[in-house]
Image: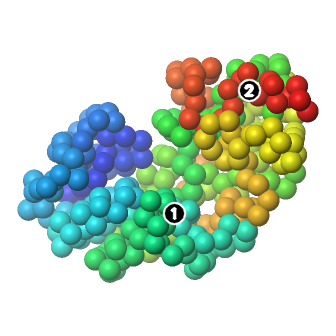
């Protein structure tokens, strides 16, 4: 029986990876504090704080067919490698497309220049450092999956779900959008990313892969979101200058328009994924992801406080100012 260790496994992506490995018949252990939820049925939980001395003692005496790492913080990444690399037949590191030094080159592949990896407080730099440390410790036993924007039910960043949730909340009223012509979106459903990680782990894939979905017109994504949400109002587009004047932020965070990338960032949502597809990546159509996301948005509350996006009253105020 395949023995799998998921470093995490009680929350979103890690939990889905553990679930899919269990469904495949593997003996799955999750190493986590257990503060983010429960492990999937059929998985075992070793409850530890990975920053504490001796955190890996219970699992470092075993041999593992697969280890999955989703962390980016240097002490977590290097601590796990020091304790477990010699015990792992294969290792999967979930990295990020945020590792790239430039975001103004549409179609760039995995050979594009990386960030220096020196500012370990910065997510992108830290992921570069994690890739380098993992490669040094594991050599050809390593799969590096540079994930794009991960979406679907359970997304705590509130980015992708903002649009279908906002349209459902607005109903027949107007919704604010950035200028859509020429803009793109590139996302990966959490279930599809987990499926690829499991596939790569089972095959012992040694590669660096941009693990994300196809490049889609942002206008088309929002059109499908409107249909899924039953939205009958207008999408009122504002220029970058109008949004900046209204103190609306791009991409993520409070008072933002999620998925809006300002000029010069076009390449961030247009990464080359041919290596991902050739290695067995299989991203689904955007509609079922939006349908599952809307169900999740309704359960969590369409008018809740969000980590990303405009509050409805903020949005209406910006619309009135246009």
The N terminus lies in which quarter of the figure? bottom left
Residue at disc 2, secondary structure: helix
Residue 314 is tagged as 2
User: Which image quadrant for residue 132?
Assistant: bottom left
User: Which image quadrant for residue 320?
Assistant: top right
| Image x and y of residue 17, in percent | 37, 49
| Image x and y of residue 71, in percent | 37, 56
Residue at disc 1, secondary structure: helix
Dot 1 corresponds to which residue?
Answer: 124
Q: Nearer the viewer, mark 2 or mark 1?
A: 2
Above or below — where is 5 with respect to 223?
Answer: below
Residue 296 is tagged as none
Tell me the residue at 58%/70% (across/down): 100
Q: CA distance from mark 2 to mark 1?
A: 30 Å
Instruction: Identify which residue, 214 or 161, lies in the foreground.
Output: 161
Tell me the residue at 48%/53% (across/down): 193
- Residue neighbourhood size for the residue with mark 1, other residues' Cα within 10 Å, grouped as few (<14), some (14–19), many (≥20): many
Q: How many marks?
A: 2
Q: Is residue 307 left or right of residue 221?
A: left
Instruction: Identify which residue, 110 or 27, lies in the foreground.
Output: 110
| Image x and y of residue 165, in percent | 66, 28
Q: Is residue 283 left or right of residue 61?
A: right
């Amino acid at each position: 029986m395949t023995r799998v260790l998921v470093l995490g496994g009680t929350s979103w992506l890690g939990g889905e990876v553990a679930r899919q490995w269990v469904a495949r018949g593997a003996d799955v252990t999750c190493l986590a504090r257990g503060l983010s939820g429960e492990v999937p049925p059929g998985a075992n939980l070793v409850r530890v704080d990975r920053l504490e001395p001796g955190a890996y003692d219970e699992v470092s005496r075993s041999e593992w067919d697969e280890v999955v790492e989703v962390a980016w913080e240097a002490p977590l990444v290097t601590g796990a490698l020091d304790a477990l690399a010699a015990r792992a037949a294969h290792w999967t590191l979930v990295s990020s497309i945020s590792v790239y030094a430039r975001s103004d080159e549409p179609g760039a592949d995995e050979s594009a220049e990386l960030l220096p990896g020196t500012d370990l407080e910065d997510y992108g730099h830290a992921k570069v450092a994690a890739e380098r440390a993992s490669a040094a410790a594991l050599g050809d036993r390593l799969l590096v999956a540079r994930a794009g924007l991960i979406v679907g039910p359970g997304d705590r960043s509130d980015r992708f779900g903002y649009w279908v949730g906002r349209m459902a909340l607005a109903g027949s009223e107007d919704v604010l959008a950035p200028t859509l012509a020429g803009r793109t979106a590139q996302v990966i459903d959490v279930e599809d990313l987990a499926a690829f990680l499991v596939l790569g782990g089972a095959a012992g894939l040694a590669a660096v892969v941009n693990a994300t979905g196809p490049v889609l017109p942002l206008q088309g994504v929002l059109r499908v979101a409107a249909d899924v949400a039953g939205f009958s109002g207008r999408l009122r587009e504002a220029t970058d200058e109008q949004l900046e004047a209204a103190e609306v932020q791009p991409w993520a965070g409070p008072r933002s328009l999620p998925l809006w990338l300002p000029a010069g960032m076009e390449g961030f949502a247009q990464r080359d994924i041919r290596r991902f597809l050739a290695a067995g990546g299989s991203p689904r159509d955007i509609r079922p992801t939006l349908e599952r996301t809307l169900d999740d948005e309704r359960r969590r509350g369409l008018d809740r406080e969000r980590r990303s996006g405009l509050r409805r009253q903020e949005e209406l105020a910006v619309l009135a100012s246009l």
